[in-house]
Amino acid sequence: MSYLPAIAWRDALDLKIRQEFTLPVISNHGLAVILTQLLAKDEYEGRAIRPPRSGLNRDAFLSGRKALLERGALLLPERGLPQSLMRVPGRKDASPGEVMCAIDPFGHIAFLSAMEFHGLTNRLPKLLYFVTFDTASWRTLAEQRMEHELGGQLAAFQEADLPPLQYSVIKRLNGVVIETLRTKEAGHWRYAMDGAIRVTGIGRTFLDMIKRPDLCGGIRHVIEVFEEHARMYLTPILAEFNTHGGKIDRVRAGYILNERCGIERPEIDAWVADTARGGSRKLDAQAEYASEFSEKWSLSINA
């Protein structure tokens, strides 16, 4: 049997970060979780760990963090990121979307930024739309996540006064303005790029265009995108509107799909039942009422 010498806990932490951590940023909380999990075991990669003399506590965390920064395993953040976040040297090429998804485990890319990701728009604004949960929901999810990731070590983690999972306010990354929207309903996303990014799926992206055209380049751009791409993605579009769309969402989308895109489908015709006869519904909710009117969809065509 070969004998492997023991390894100091700082060296084990250094190796674990360099070999296993793949995200572009790590928070103080994330680092504290990794340290807790490391010290909960007697060995790392077959080598016994020489733990800190005082055991797991805040001083050990700060000492480990300092060692990682001095060795270059982690870097202090650039402008725009708080000191509670550190960059990973090998992931400096990460996009702002990847960085935001690494910082906020509950948020996702949406609206015009999701349209860009899916290749639905040629507009490339220096702006990233990011959706996450409201304060109360975010706090509840953070508590649940800590319980899940730490399990039996949660009590020791808290007794050691280690950093909890907290929300970070990010306003700009690499010259890109981060526009964050917080809502109770921030769970409509899917993984992309091998899990590096969370983004609204194609059907949800089309639904968001109808719900918030102001965040998707404006209603005229939304119509252009529907005209160019809706036929290709009609199945997920219909499924999303039928499952998660409101009546007015289906009416607006029905008009665009039917009368602007020339798409005839029984599923779309069924949405006529969602119209409000004699009402004053508008294609663009935020624009002024227009005299042009769609009789079929009972809709003022104000775009």
Image (cartoon, rainbow, N blue to C red):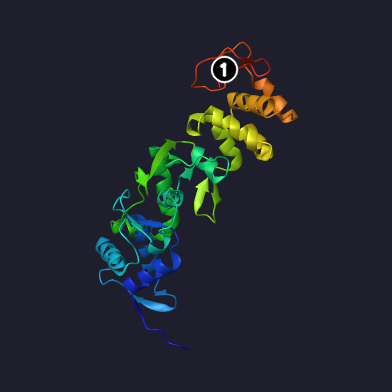
Image quarter (top left, top right, bottom left or bottom right) of the C terminus = top right
In terms of secondary structure, where does tag 1 sit? loop
For residue 58, side relative to residue 121 (left or right): left
Q: Give the x, y percent position of residue 79.
A: 30, 50
Question: Is 218 located above or below residue 60 in the figure?
Answer: above
Q: Give the x, y percent position of residue 290.
A: 55, 14
Write the residue at 51% across / 39% down. 123
Asked whether 300 or 246 is in front, the reply is 300
Residue 188 seen: no
For residue 254, side relative to residue 16 (left or right): right
Report which quarter residue 284 is drawn in: top right
Q: How many marks?
A: 1
Write the residue at 68% across / 21% down. 272
**Please, what is the three-letter code of the amino acid marked with disc 1?**
Arg
- Callout 1 environment at 10 Å: few (<14), some (14 to 19), or many (20+)? many
Question: Is 232 located above or below residue 288 in the figure?
Answer: below
Q: Give the x, y percent position of residue 181.
A: 42, 36
Asked whether 288 or 202 is in front, the reply is 288
Residue 180 seen: yes
Question: Is 159 located above or below residue 168 in the figure?
Answer: below
Write the residue at 55% across / 40% down. 121
Disc 1 designates what residue?
281
Q: Give the x, y percent position of residue 225.
A: 59, 35
For residue 231, side relative to residue 144 (left or right): right
Asked whether 206 or 154 is in front, the reply is 206
Report which quarter residue 11 is drawn in: bottom left
